[in-house]
Image (cartoon, rainbow, N blue to C red):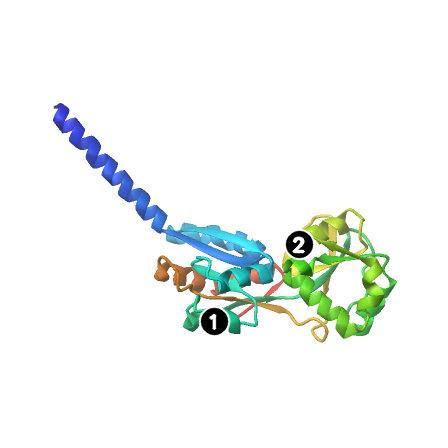
Amino acid sequence: MKKYLLSSVVVLALLLGNSFSVRAQGEITVIAPGGAKAALDQLIPDFERKTGYKVKATTGSGLGTKKQVIQGDAFDVPIVQPPLAEVIASGNVVASTETPLASVAVGVAVRKGAPKSDISTPEAVKRMLLAAKSVTYPNPAGGAAAGVSFNETLKKLGIAEQLQPKIKLAQGGAGAMELVAKGEAEIGLTFLSEMSDPGIDVVGPLPREISPPTALVGFVSTHAKDPAAAKALLDYLSSPEAAAVYKAQGMQPGR
């Protein structure tokens, strides 16, 4: 009897061990820029329910996440922003799996209830920025793609130097929106998908002529533990179902 019980315990332990191994292999890792976070937070739980896979997503600055992919950090599904030449040349992504997911524009926000300026043309945006007492956006020095994009906008408008005394750089898009919500900055700019603070009102996106939307492109990594699982997630993130979520987050679906 004791021998039978011992054998049963050993078999159960082996089964549990194998079960854990299967679960561990079933985890898909993702790296993405912060502009994708709101959409991923919504999409990943649904993918997990439908497939049984677990997904672990890491988000950071646009330039920072791209650097991690180029240097070969082990993620199953990298989501990066163009240009893509260095990413593909690194050999760390399967080039044939390149999948446009969505694009997101840099938008303007003000404190809740504050007047909304006209931003329909480059000239209107220029007038708004020059009239503002203070302007905040994500610090481009940390690789924040929205900050890098807005710096380019200021150059196109020819007011980069004039605006310097008014600028309050923030830690990420959420940080910029918090400054606006608290009344510590009059105008806030970041990706529309990062404008979720209840203390702000969204004015709208900047005109495309001075601020082209930033694309998000997914790949299967050459380091993927389970390439089929990684491809299944990538397919879901580019599906019509995902497109509806992107639109709700102020993004434009890639397909």
Type of the residue with mark 2: Gly
Q: Label 2 to label 1, Cα distance in Å?
A: 27 Å
Q: Is 132 drawn above or below residue 14 in the view shown?
A: below
User: In the image, 40: left or right of 147?
Assistant: left
Q: Position of residue 110 (x, y in %)?
A: 78, 55
Q: Is 2 drawn above or below residue 172 in the view shown?
A: above
**Disc 1 on helix, strand or loop?**
helix
User: In the image, 44: left or right of 20?
Assistant: right
Q: Quadrant of residue 138?
A: bottom right
In front of the other: 133 or 224:
224
Q: Position of residue 139 (x, y in %)?
A: 70, 57
Identify the mark nearer the N-term, 2 or 1. Answer: 1
Q: Quadrant of residue 253?
A: bottom right
Q: Which mark is residue 88?
A: 1
**Disc 2 on helix, strand or loop?**
helix
Q: Residue at x 44, y 57 (%)?
A: 74
Density class for disc 1 (Cα within 10 Å; few <14, some 14-19, many ≥20) is some
Residue identified by numbered label 2 = 172
Type of the residue with mark 1: Ile
Q: Is 230 drawn above or below residue 125 in the view shown?
A: above
Q: Which mark is residue 236?
A: none
In front of the other: 124 or 132:
132
Residue 114 showing in the rendered view: yes
Density class for disc 2 (Cα within 10 Å; few <14, some 14-19, many ≥20) is many
Mark 2 or 1, closer to the camera? 1
Q: Residue at x 57, y 61 (%)?
A: 246
User: In the image, 142: left or right of 118?
Assistant: left
Q: Position of residue 152 (x, y in %)?
A: 71, 70
Q: Residue at x 51, y 62 (%)?
A: 79
Residue 206 showing in the rendered view: no
Quarter of the image where the N terminus is located: top left
